[in-house]
Image (cartoon, rainbow, N blue to C red):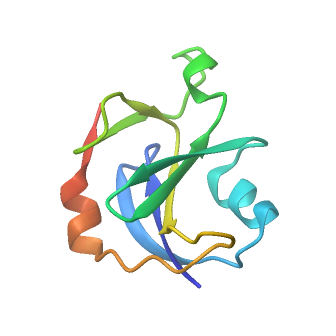
Amino acid sequence: MRAILIETDKQTVREVEFGGKLEDAYKLLDVSLIEGVYIQGHVIYVDEEGLLTPKTIQKGWFKWETYRQPLAGRGLIVGNGIDDWESATMTIKDAIKGVTWC
């Protein structure tokens, strides 16, 4: 399925193929715990412990235009499925517009 990866370490936003499993999200985000941030009919999954990681270790931060606080580490945008993962329908252009690097 289609997802959008926000790479804070490279400051890039790109489409990726996502297998739709929790382990796939862990691998793409390079983390062991995730939490979802709900935005504009989608979910951005991020490192659940990202805000606790020291700034000297963290791979970067970003803000989403409609979310109140910075997000730490990489982000994975997927559709907001009720009971399951769904493909992202957001365009790359809108994803790039929504991200501000911190």
The residue at 51%/17% (across/down) is 55
Q: Position of residue 42 (x, y in %)?
A: 43, 64
The answer to which quarter of the image holds residue 53 is top right
The residue at 63%/76% (across/down) is 18
The residue at 41%/33% (across/down) is 61
Q: How many marks?
A: 0
Q: Position of residue 67 (x, y in %)?
A: 31, 39
The answer to which quarter of the image holds residue 97 is bottom left
Viewer-nearest residue: 15 or 82: 82
Residue 35 lies left or right of residue 5; in this view the side is: right
Viewer-nearest residue: 18 or 39: 39
Seen in the picture, residue 5 relative to 36 is either above or below; the reply is below
Q: Position of residue 33 (x, y in %)?
A: 75, 41
Residue 2 lies left or right of residue 42; in this view the side is: right
Residue 91 lies left or right of residue 85; in this view the side is: left
- Image quadrant where one finds the C terminus: top left
Residue 20 lies left or right of residue 10; in this view the side is: right
Q: Which residue reaches farthest bottom? A: 1
The residue at 68%/70% (across/down) is 83
- Image quadrant where one finds the N terminus: bottom right
Q: Position of residue 66 (x, y in %)?
A: 24, 44
Q: Which residue reaches farthest front? A: 82
